[in-house]
Image: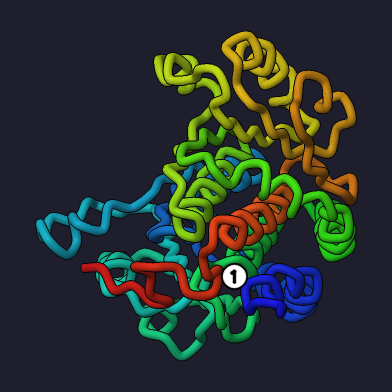
């Protein structure tokens, strides 16, 4: 029987195609209508926070804006919000319900700054608090763990990166996303076998860098949510500053290693990990990534590095789904999780 989670993972090519069709022009219009600003501050939690981390790379590299992550407790617990002059305030939330994310946008508006909400619910409190709203059009998520809303959030952040950077040529690259996602899904036939191979492990390390640091963080979260494995994500740079000492014989390490600026850096780390006895699973679109890897999950579609996180998370979602089943769990109803989490 197909789970809701599997259905939602498989729906992502259609969801992203619909999102691009419905919201690309609107994102361009919003970008053109924004008043001048110098910085971006993004408020988000959980999976949405990983979309914000992706934006730190995409909006800075394509549009030149420094992007920071908000600290909502300053607004709701300590009541000491920072000065937000010349700042675009962005809230990202699947449900749009969390009071602390809403509070950041409300304070931004109180200080006279432009505000943008990215949410799957255009009637939510977050949408009501914002000057501008982009909806994800992902439909109802019947599984607790977020999948299609995450790739939709990444796609919206990519839309704005192109629009704010005045790079219309990037639109042709964005248009390749649905086919790339479909091709990636079609290439994952070996995932159930891999899940069976890893089902007894209780720890896992995730490594990415640059645009795909967000992918490492999101996959670690999915593994914790769905399989209860203690998965910890690192930037490859930070990993060298101490945590590499935790790797011993047989330790599973999942590396997100697409072609691009980070490939050589991760190649060097691969050698060091294998010398320590790591069991290395690589997610990549580069055939050379097979060298040194115990297993490889492909990213298809030949996307540029700045868009690769939108496809790179898909093999990870599939792995978390099948690993949960291999460990005897219910992927649609993981323990201790709720679809909407309200934090203050």
Residue occupying the point 75% across, 28% down: 294
**Residue 321 location in percent, x, y?**
62, 61
86 versus 24 height, above or below:
above
- Camera-side residue: 201 or 112? 201
Residue occupying the point 36% across, 84% down: 125
335 versus 251 height, above or below:
below
Q: Residue 303: in sight, yes or no?
A: yes
Hey, which quadrant is residue 326 in on the image?
A: bottom right
86 versus 22 height, above or below:
above
Indicate the quadrant containing the C terminus: top left, top right, bottom left or bottom right.
Answer: bottom left
Left/right of residue 21 with respect to residue 74 in the rendered view? right
Residue occupying the point 53% across, 50% down: 218
- Camera-side residue: 96 or 195? 195
Colour mapping: rainbow
Element type where label 1 sits in the image: helix
336 versus 40 height, above or below:
below
Hey, which quadrant is residue 152 in on the image?
A: bottom right
Indicate the quadrant containing the N terminus: top left, top right, bottom left or bottom right.
Answer: bottom right
Taking the view exactly as shown, the residue that stands out farthest to the bottom is 123
Q: Residues within 10 Å of mark 1 (few under 14, many from 20)?
A: many
**Residue 310 location in percent, x, y?**
70, 54
Left/right of residue 233 with respect to residue 269 in the rendered view? left
**Residue 77 location in percent, x, y?**
12, 61
- Camera-side residue: 299 or 252? 252
Residue at which label 1 appears: 149
Q: Residue 160: in sight, yes or no?
A: no
Left/right of residue 35 with respect to residue 165 in the rendered view? left
Residue occupying the point 42% across, 86% down: 124
**Residue 99 location in percent, x, y?**
27, 74
């Amino acid at each position: 029987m197909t789970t809701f989670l599997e259905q939602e993972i498989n729906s992502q090519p259609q969801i992203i195609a619909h999102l691009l069709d419905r919201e690309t022009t609107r994102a361009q219009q919003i970008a053109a209508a924004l008043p001048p600003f110098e910085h971006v501050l993004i408020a988000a939690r959980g999976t949405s926070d990983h979309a914000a981390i992706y934006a730190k790379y995409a909006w800075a590299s394509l549009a030149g804006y420094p992007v920071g992550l908000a600290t909502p407790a300053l607004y709701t617990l300590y009541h000491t919000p920072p000065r937000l002059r010349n700042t675009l305030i962005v809230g990202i939330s699947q449900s749009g319900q969390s009071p602390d994310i809403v509070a950041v946008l409300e304070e931004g508006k109180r200080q006279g700054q432009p505000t943008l909400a990215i949410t799957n619910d255009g009637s939510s409190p977050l949408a009501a608090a914002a000057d501008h709203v982009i909806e994800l059009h992902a439909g109802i998520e019947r599984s607790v763990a977020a999948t299609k809303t995450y790739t939709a959030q990444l796609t919206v952040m990519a839309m704005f990166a192109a629009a704010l950077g005045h790079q219309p040529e990037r639109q042709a690259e964005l248009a390749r996303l649905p086919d790339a996602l479909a091709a990636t899904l079609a290439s994952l036939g070996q995932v159930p076998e891999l899940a069976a191979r890893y089902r007894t492990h209780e720890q896992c390390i995730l490594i990415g860098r640059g645009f795909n640091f967000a992918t490492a963080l999101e996959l670690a979260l999915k593994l914790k949510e769905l399989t209860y494995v203690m998965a910890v994500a690192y930037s490859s740079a930070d990993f060298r500053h101490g945590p590499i000492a935790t790797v011993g014989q047989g330790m599973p390490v999942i590396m997100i290693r697409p072609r691009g600026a980070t490939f050589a850096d991760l190649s060097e780390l691969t050698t060091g990990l294998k010398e320590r006895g790591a069991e290395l699973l690589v997610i990549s679109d580069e055939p050379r990534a097979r060298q040194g890897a115990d297993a490889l999950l492909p990213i298809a579609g030949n996307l540029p590095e700045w868009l690769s996180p939108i496809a790179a998370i898909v093999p990870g979602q599939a792995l978390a789904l099948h690993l949960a089943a291999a460990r005897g769990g219910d992927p649609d109803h993981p323990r201790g999780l709720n679809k909407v989490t309200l934090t203050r």
